[in-house]
Image (cartoon, helix red, strand yellow):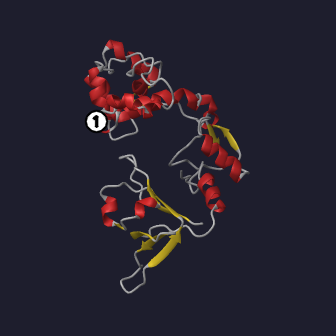
């Protein structure tokens, strides 16, 4: 989240809204207190448009446009244009019976590239091309069908567009408010060179600012590491026992975060 406060209208360059299903985010907003919110739709001033081969049109117009090269069976998007394909190309009812069914080993066979899964369902190459442009991933080849089915299964629980809210003073007020709840300093841009298990605590060792400087060491009861396991962790020295006290969260391949959070006692 990042509000461009220095520009007229304070446009958002990151996340713009919070849905009714974002329970932890809404809880954090309540915890911070004082953040006034309004309906996201009330602040949308321009009609959404598609630019197709040099022509502007609404998503509803795209459904019947001559520029739409989807087969007839895939054209009905309910006025959402190509963005609806992520839902309309999936089976109904969902093969995932419950919200947490994606964790069931019985559905492991669905953990295949999304394009492979959709081709098996007869989805056209044209639809796959539009999905590559509209999915919030690196494309249908690089995301699991199981993950997309999970997202579709959860979607009804996230509320309608009318439930979307935004922070009136700008979405940046949320991370700023979270910073105010933290104890101690937030260190950014400090490379971590080692994580050591010291039996009763974990030690995080940071690279010094200069060659002649001293490495800074942080001590904590737990460490949450959200960097991708490979190849970044190869550059961080870890003791043999570090995994007992260092929780390494397997990052989604499209999330290129490089963060180490030290959770002190």
Task: Tell me which residue sits at (38%, 53%) in the image.
Answer: 256
Q: Relative to 157, does residue 264 appear above or below in the rendering?
A: below
Q: For the C terminus, which image quadrant?
A: bottom right
Q: Position of residue 242 (x, y in %)?
A: 41, 64
User: Which residue is nearer to you in this view: 41 or 182?
Assistant: 182
Q: Nearer the viewer, residue 169 or 144?
A: 144
User: Which image quadrant for residue 86?
Assistant: top left
Residue 206 appears anywhere in the view: yes
- Pick the front one: 11 or 223: 223
Q: Describe residue 24's horizontal placement relative to residue 56 as left or right.
A: right
Foreground residue, 259 or 189?
259
Horizontal and vertical percent position of residue 191? 40, 69
**Quadrant assignment, res 240:** bottom left
Q: Visible in this render: residue 53? A: no
Query: Quick check: 67 above or below 136?
Result: above
Q: Name the residue: 32% across, 29% down.
A: 109
Residue placed furthest toward the top: 72
Q: Which residue is mark 1?
A: 141
């Amino acid at each position: 989240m990042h509000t461009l406060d220095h520009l007229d209208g304070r446009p958002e360059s990151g996340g713009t809204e919070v849905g009714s299903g974002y329970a932890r985010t809404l809880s954090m907003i309540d915890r911070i207190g004082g953040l006034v919110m309004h309906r996201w739709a009330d602040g949308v001033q321009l009609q959404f448009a598609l630019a197709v081969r040099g022509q502007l049109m609404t998503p509803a117009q795209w459904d019947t446009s001559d520029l739409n090269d989807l087969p007839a069976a895939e054209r009905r998007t309910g006025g959402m244009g190509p963005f609806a394909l992520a839902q309309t190309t999936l089976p109904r009812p969902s093969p995932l019976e419950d919200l947490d069914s994606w964790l069931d080993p019985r559905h492991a066979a669905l953990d295949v590239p999304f394009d492979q899964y959709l081709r098996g369902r007869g989805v056209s190459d044209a639809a796959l091309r539009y999905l590559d442009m509209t999915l919030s991933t690196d494309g249908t080849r690089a995301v699991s069908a199981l993950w997309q089915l999970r997202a579709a299964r959860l979607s009804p629980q996230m509320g309608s567009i009318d439930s979307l809210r935004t922070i009136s003073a700008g979405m940046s007020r949320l991370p700023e408010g979270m910073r105010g709840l933290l104890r101690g300093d937030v260190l950014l841009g400090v490379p971590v060179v080692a994580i050591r298990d010291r039996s009763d605590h974990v030690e995080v060792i940071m690279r010094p600012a200069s060659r002649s400087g001293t490495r800074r060491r942080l001590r904590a009861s737990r460490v949450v590491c959200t960097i991708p396991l490979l190849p970044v962790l190869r550059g961080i020295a870890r003791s043999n026992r570090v995994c007992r006290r260092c929780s390494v969260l397997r990052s989604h391949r499209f999330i290129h975060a490089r963060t180490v959070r030290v959770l002190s006692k």
